[in-house]
């Protein structure tokens, strides 16, 4: 689609050609089941899976044995929240999360709430940041889990996870971090950040769709989970089902590329994002929705006050943009993230998310700027 400009990388990313090339043999020549341990076809597949597991662990600084493969971040979040809720009922039933979390977290919390969990939803300020004092006030000895995303999918705002972890661990609770938008874009270290459970998804950083992983800490503390799928005891009993070997190989390759090229890609993307903002913000009474000094390098969520985002996007149909989360775009409501950040309905409906990627060029950004100039001038 060479006539289109893609600026919706937070929704999904194109598969890196090197990732695809690495995956292809595992569809045909190396097609074995990784659980088949009696012949070479299975051994080859299992070796590829364990190699990918190691590459993921190297990217986020954990043990390879702490990586559990899933179909994506949503499944990983379900396993983490439901698994902890069922495993730690002797300690308590209290879970803390944030109003700006992804629907995968919020909806899963609603599910366990129906089964007896008590959920506290922390508020955020106009920059999308939680108040650590509010967390301290609400956490207790009965709190079994605190779920806070590392970086928001709509605004890109980054939470101070290491400070949050200190508060969580003082009460003997566990920290679940949805890092779906962060992994592969910014450096990650689950040890330094004190993360106990963390999800990721390959298609957010140039890997295939339908594959993700859950990091489950094995030491200090050792996290216990009740499995949510039965049937074969795969992935150390935590996630049954035949492993998607080609996709797992792709995820591993995407992690390897990110580790080697993240710094270079980030510098280029930040330049393009800032260049885009500088030009667009000067076209009217427009503003960026979040703390611009504490966000992902590729995201700019701009409020075009006085205009409707859907109408603006309809005038530039060759540019792929978003007005909120791709996972909730069918809902004709203002973004729950922007509303939680105290934007009015009008300003929430006036906001557009620009999310850039490593394939974005300056020529494309110039065309985007020109397209908006034609609308406003």
Image (spheres, helix red, strand yellow):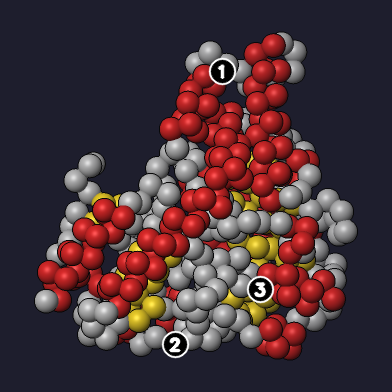
Q: Residue at x 58, y 31 (%)?
A: 249
Q: CA separation, marks 1 and 3?
A: 43 Å
- What quarter of the picture does the N terminus occupy? top left
- First in sequence, mark 3 or 2: give its number: 3
Q: Is residue 282 above or below residue 188?
A: below
Numbered mark located on residue 202 in the image: none
Q: Residues within 10 Å of mark 2 (few under 14, many from 20)?
A: some
- Name the residue beneath numbered marker 1: 31
Q: Residue at x 48, y 86 (%)?
A: 126
Nearer the observer: mark 1 or 3; the answer is 3
- Name the residue beneath numbered marker 3: 160
Residue 241, how many percent across, how many down? Answer: 63, 34
**Nearer to us in this view, 215 or 140:** 215
Circle 1: element type: loop
Whether residue 77 is visible to the viewer of this picture, yes or no, is no
Circle 3: element type: loop
Numbered mark located on residue 342 in the image: 2
Q: CA separation, marks 1 and 2?
A: 52 Å
Q: Is residue 359 above or below residue 376?
A: above
Cβ–Cβ under 8 Å for marks 1 and 2: no
Q: Residue at x 55, y 83 (%)?
A: 124
Image check: 72 left or right of 55? left
Q: Residue at x 71, y 18 (%)?
A: 43
- First in sequence, mark 1 or 2: give its number: 1
Q: CA separation, marks 3 and 2?
A: 21 Å
Residue 349, how many percent across, how many down? Answer: 30, 77
**Nearer to us in this view, 95 or 314:** 314
- First in sequence, mark 1 or 3: give its number: 1
């Amino acid at each position: 689609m060479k006539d289109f400009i893609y600026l919706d990388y937070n929704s999904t990313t194109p598969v890196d050609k090197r990732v695809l090339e690495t995956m292809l043999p595992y569809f045909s020549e190396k097609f074995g089941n990784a659980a088949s341990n009696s012949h070479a076809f299975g051994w080859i597949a299992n070796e590829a899976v364990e190699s990918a597991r190691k590459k993921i662990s190297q990217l986020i600084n954990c043990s390879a044995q702490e990586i559990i493969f899933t179909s994506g971040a949503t499944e990983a979040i379900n396993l983490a929240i439901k698994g902890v809720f069922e495993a730690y009922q002797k300690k308590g039933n209290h879970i803390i999360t944030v109003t700006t979390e992804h629907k995968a977290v919020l909806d899963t919390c609603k599910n366990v709430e129906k089964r007896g969990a008590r959920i506290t939803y922390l508020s955020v300020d106009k920059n999308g940041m939680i108040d650590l004092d509010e967390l301290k006030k609400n956490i207790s000895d009965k709190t079994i889990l605190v779920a806070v995303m590392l970086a928001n999918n709509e605004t890109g705002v980054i939470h101070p996870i290491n400070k949050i972890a200190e508060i969580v661990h003082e009460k003997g609770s566990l920290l679940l971090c949805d890092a779906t938008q962060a992994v592969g874009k910014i450096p990650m270290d689950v040890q330094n950040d004190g993360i106990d459970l963390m999800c990721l998804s390959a298609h957010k950083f140039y890997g295939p769709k339908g594959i993700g992983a859950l990091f489950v800490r094995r030491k200090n503390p050792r996290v216990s989970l009740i499995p949510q799928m039965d049937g074969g005891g795969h992935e150390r009993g935590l996630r049954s089902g035949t492993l998607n070997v080609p996709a797992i190989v792709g995820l591993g390759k995407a992690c390897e590329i990110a580790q080697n090229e993240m710094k270079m890609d980030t510098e280029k993307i930040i330049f393009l994002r800032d260049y885009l903002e500088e030009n667009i913000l000067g076209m009217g009474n427009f503003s960026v929705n979040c703390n611009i000094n504490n966000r992902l390098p590729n995201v700019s969520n701009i409020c075009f006050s006085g205009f409707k985002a859907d109408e603006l996007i309809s005038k530039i149909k060759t540019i792929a943009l978003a007005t909120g989360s791709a996972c909730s775009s069918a809902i004709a409501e203002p973004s729950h993230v922007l509303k939680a950040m105290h934007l009015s309905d009008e300003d929430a409906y006036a906001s557009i998310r620009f999310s850039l990627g490593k394939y974005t060029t300056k020529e494309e950004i110039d065309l985007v700027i020109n397209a908006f100039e034609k609308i406003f001038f």
